[in-house]
Amino acid sequence: MSTLPETRALPVPEGLEGERVDAALARMLGFSRTKAAELAAAGKVRIDGAEVGKSERVTGGSWIEVEMPAPAAPVRLEATPVEGMEIVHDDEDLIVVNKPVGVAAHPSPGWSGTTVVGGLAAAGYRIATSGAAERQGVVHRLDVGTSGLMVVAKSENAYSRLKQQFRDRTVDKRYHALVQGHPDPLSGTIDAPVGRHPQHDYKWAVTADGKPSVTHYDLIEAFRAASLLDIKLETGRTHQIRVHMSAHRHPCAGDLTYGADPVLARRLGLTRQWLHAVRLGFAHPADGRWVEFATDYPEDLRGALDRLRAESGG
């Protein structure tokens, strides 16, 4: 694979007449306006041979040249033990793990910490080779800052059939989330498209051009400052629960990325979002029988609830 920068030259569509350079590039090349603005600021964007800034306007029919960054080096899988990762279930076709907080599902550019895939490799597990090299066997993911249940395929048949169940939305994925305040109504559905945040590459947001995203929630327990919710995902977008609850004005406690109150986070002893994948149910890929797995809250999340109950006199 070449690691040299690539220069792309494209005609500006007439429909983008008058758009800013960063907005036009984002639409033409499919990445964020932030990334387009960074390229312009670095002198990597030219129109008809002349270097331009991010805020200049494009003209339909002109040629825009972009010097793209060199492709990242292939991500390597490091077989590294993962402290605290529990094997909930293991058979010939799949493994269900209880992922600790601070662990990624698989290697990715810029991530140097431990991963579920690397932890399984270190423990001697052989998993499916389907999927990209760095995420083989990974059927679905959890955020680094989210703990709980994940299923990893060991056989190629299991990978294919589990992926299809996720696509068909027949998997029962349940989370518990501690959110700030008290949602109104206390049980409901949030149906709002989720896409890349227009200003921040590392965030997601409710956007008009996002992918359809549906989150169902029900109250489990109410406290003075927060509510514990049972959440069922109908879709599985990146950061979906965190984005939806934040857009609903009730961010997950401790989730400073999406607007949580840092004072409450400190009071509850939280250093991450209070979000845990508590239950996972699906048709077993070998014989179609329905299987379900559940897990308890980790210590930091239990501690936050204990503090809230003490404050509420419970």
Image: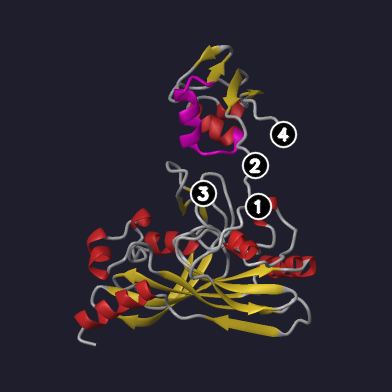
Viewer-side residue, 298 vs 237: 298
Q: Magenta span: helix, strand or loop, mainly?
A: helix
Tag 1: Cα neighbours inside 10 Å, few (<14), some, or many (≥20)?
some
Q: Position of residue 32 (x, y in %)?
A: 51, 39
108 left or right of 154? left
Q: Height in image: 245 above or below 56? A: below
Provide the residue designation for mark 3.
111
Q: Position of residue 110 (x, y in %)?
A: 51, 44
Q: Height in image: 2 above or below 114? A: above
User: Given the image, on which type of amino acid does mark 1 rest?
Assistant: Glu
Viewer-side residue, 291 vs 208: 291
The image's mark for residue 134 is 1
Tag 4: Cα neighbours inside 10 Å, few (<14), some, or many (≥20)?
few
Dot placed on the residue nearer the N-terminal end, 2 or 4: 4
Residue contact at pointers 2 and 3, CB within 8 angstroms: no
Quarter holding residue 184: bottom left
Q: CA distance from mark 2 to mark 4?
A: 9 Å
Q: Residue at x 65, y 62 (%)?
A: 121
Q: Which residues are magenta?
A: 29-44
Provide the residue designation for mark 4.
1
Tell me the colour scheme of the image: secondary structure
Secondary element type, mark 2? loop
130 left or right of 54? right
Secondary element type, mark 4? loop
Residue contact at pointers 2 and 4, CB within 8 angstroms: yes
Q: Residue at x 29, y 70 (%)?
A: 181
User: Given the image, on which type of amino acid does mark 2 rest?
Assistant: Pro
Q: Residue at x 59, y 13 (%)?
A: 48
Dot placed on the residue nearer the N-terminal end, 4 or 3: 4
Secondary element type, mark 1? helix
Q: CA distance from mark 1 to mark 2?
A: 9 Å
